Amino acid sequence: METIKLKGEYIKLGQALKAAGLVGSGVDAKYAIEDGLVSVNGETEYQRGKKLRSGDTVTFEGNTINIE
């Protein structure tokens, strides 16, 4: 389980996947999200620019990211 501490109000979904080291690039994040492989708070998310705020949980390929 990975934890990302917010420096501002939010982080975008694609950036969070990169920051957690779950994808190698923004392009990889884009395709993973478009293919429906990423969920936010238990629901499949298709928007790379989805704003994640404190308390959100992201799941991708068995990995979990908590946003604080």
Image: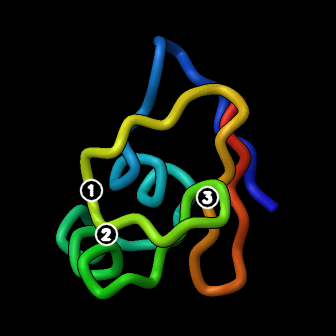
Q: Nearer the viewer, residue 26 or 64?
A: 64
Whichever of labels 2 and 3 marks the residue nearer the N terminus, that label is: 2
Q: Residue at x 39, y 35 (%)?
A: 51
The kind of residue tagged 2 is Ala
Q: Is residue 29 left or right of residue 8?
A: left
Q: Residue at x 34, y 80 (%)?
A: 32
CA distance separating discs 3 and 1 = 12 Å
16 in relation to 44, above or below: above
* Mark 1, residue position: 48
All told, the count of numbered labels is: 3
- Crowd band around label 3 with a 10 angstrom C-alpha radius: few (<14), some (14–19), many (20+): many
Q: Residue at x 40, y 50 (%)?
A: 13
* Residue 19, x across and y down, in percent: 49, 49
Locate the C terminus by quadrant. top right
CA distance separating discs 2 and 3 = 13 Å
- Crowd band around label 1 with a 10 angstrom C-alpha radius: few (<14), some (14–19), many (20+): many
Whichever of labels 3 and 1 marks the residue nearer the N terminus, that label is: 1
Q: Residue at x 53, y 15 (%)?
A: 7
The kind of residue tagged 3 is Val
